Image (cartoon, grey):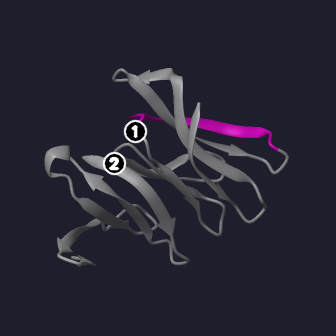
Amino acid sequence: MYVFGVALDSAGNPYVVGSDPTVEFHPFPGCFVAKFDSAGTQLWHRDLNVYFWPGGAVAVDAAGNPYVTAGGFVGKYDADGNLAWSDAFDGIGSSIAVDASGRVLVGGWTYPYEVSSAILRTYDNNGCGFRPMPITDSGASRSLNA
């Protein structure tokens, strides 16, 4: 197994996102998210049904809900491991953050790789309102285009 990202909830429980070579998905290793208690006991494990790619991340909101990105997947789970919402996209999510209002930001890059570009995707707390924000190169500086 490989771990790409770790986040803690307010009680100190770690959530991890990674890949498991024993789970195949088209025929690459599959990705997962798991929750542990503060003593290290695994409480739950969920396969994301997306293939392994170097990258992936997890963030936790104030209520203890993990938000995950890996492969072309982004999703919100509740603290008990139930999927609340998800979205699939052509690209790779490599970082994720959630703010106090529940706005979710996913950073990564798009396909195809020959013309890949960095992206920032935004969602509200219910997984709605997706808005791509491509990052363009304007010489020495970079800016977000909404």
**Position of residue 86 measured from the top left corner of the image (x, y, whole percent):** 40, 50
Q: Which segment did they paint magenta?
A: 40-52
Please name the residue shown 80% across and 39% down the image.
Answer: 41
Residue type for callout 2: Ile
The residue to which callout 1 is attached is: 53
Q: Main secondary structure of the magenta part?
A: strand
- Which circle's residue, 2 or 1, is located before the other in the chain? 1
Is 101 one of the magenta-colored residues? no
Q: Of the numbered discs in the image, which one, if any, rests on residue 7?
A: none
Residue 143 quadrant: bottom left
Picture quarter with the N terminus = top right
Please name the residue shown 54% across and 28% down the image.
Answer: 20
The residue to which callout 2 is attached is: 92
* Residue 88 visible within the image: no
Contact, CB < 8 Å: mark 2 with mark 1?
yes
Q: Nearer the viewer, residue 82 or 107?
A: 107
Residue type for callout 1: Trp
Distance of mark 2 from mark 1, alpha carbons? 8 Å
Q: Nearer the viewer, residue 17 or 101?
A: 17
Picture quarter with the C terminus = bottom left
Is 42 one of the magenta-colored residues? yes
131 left or right of 95?
left
**Position of residue 8 measured from the top left corner of the image (x, y, whole percent):** 69, 59
Label 2 CA crowd tier, 10 Å (few <14, some 14–19, many 20+)? many
* Residue 98 visible within the image: yes
Label 1 CA crowd tier, 10 Å (few <14, some 14–19, many 20+)? some
